[in-house]
Image (spheres, rainbow, N blue to C red):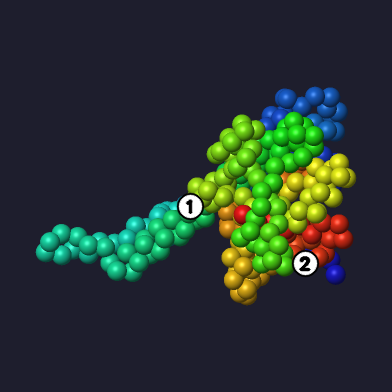
Amino acid sequence: MSNGFDHLKLCKADAEMLDRLVDVGFELDQLEYLTPEDKQRATSILKMFGFLDAYPVEDASDSLIDATLVRIDQYESQRTARMQIHTPELETTKRGFRIRMPDLITVAAMILVTVSVFTMISNSTRNQSLTNQCASNMAMVGRGLVNYALDHNGETPTESAPAVASLFGGLAPERTNAQLLAKKGYCDHNHLNCPGHSGESSGFSYQTQPAAMWDAIRNQGKLFIIMSDQNPILKQLLANQKYDQLTPSPAHGSLGQNHLRDDGSINSVAAPIFKGDLIWVLDAQNKGIDIFLTH
């Protein structure tokens, strides 16, 4: 089926000439390299456009113009309204103005959310700062232990720990004596505390072993010293109460605890486990040394 307007289509030559006229702004004298046939074709096209210019057209009615302007105004008003930030309306009273209760609740909720977020960020930053300071203090104690051992033929300072003897079959074990390090100048007294323990005198827990085990460690010639943040379940162990052996030290919130390991490294770990050994309890998981930290 043929289109009823097929007879109005331009031929290829007319279409090309129309494009050239458009490029020069319909100025015939601006066209270059015209053959007599091309010039005649261009003149005919310009005459056709002249007929269009002379075609009588009625002016738009005032009602159409007014309707169009109203539509434009409505669109502009809607766009302006969408871009506005509405503030709570004020109710007028004899004493002045007051904010409506729903608006007051909304403002209060926004303030609470802001305070909560700020508190969370502040606590996280504080805990991380305490963890870093704790690790720094622990490193100084570790350096003091190494220097003490170098000055004392490989021996490390220990002291009897009768307070935890009940956990060793009634025999008092020996525990690393960090106080002696500070007393002899191998570290400062403030290095013995973790800032997360709120200034308690025994800020860290230290490796605690039977005397014979310490002798075995020294005979091996290996400096096996471990200290960490405070053992959080030691009181429950001594009182024979229920406890969770995976309880993290409270010093650093949810960040876990710092460890000073036998290779001199300091690590912050979430779980109180070292090489598969639970460090808060005597669990006999390590065939060599059953790591146990007390204070």
Q: Give the structural element (helix, strand or loop) at label 2.
A: loop
> Which one is nearer the viewer's eye here, 223 or 101?
223
Query: Residue at 54% of width from left, 46% of height from top?
Result: 195
In the displayed structure, 204 sits above or below 13; it is below
Label 2 Cα crowd, 10 Å radius (few <14 / some 14-19 / many 20+): few
Query: Which percent across, then down, holds residue 260?
Result: 72, 46
Query: Which percent across, then down, holds residue 225?
Result: 75, 46
Q: Give the structural element (helix, strand or loop) at label 1.
A: helix
The residues bearing labels 2 and 1 have C-alpha atoms spaced at a distance of 42 Å
Task: Give the residue at mark 2.
Answer: 283
Label disc, if present, on residue 118 of the rendered structure: 1
> Which one is nearer the viewer's eye here, 223 or 69?
223
- In which quadrant is the C terminus drawn? bottom right
Query: Which percent across, then down, holds residue 124?
Result: 56, 51
Residue type for callout 2: Asp
* Residue 65 seen: no
In the displayed structure, 23 sits above or below 87; it is above
Residue type for callout 1: Phe
Query: Residue at 36% of width from left, 62% of height from top?
Result: 108
Q: In the drawing, does residue 90 fall left or right of residue 59?
A: left
Query: Which percent across, then down, holds residue 209?
Result: 74, 55
Q: How many marks?
A: 2
In the displayed structure, 224 sits above or below 86; it is above
Q: Earlier in the sequence, mark 2 or mark 1?
A: 1
Query: Residue at 57% of width from left, 45% of height from top?
Result: 193
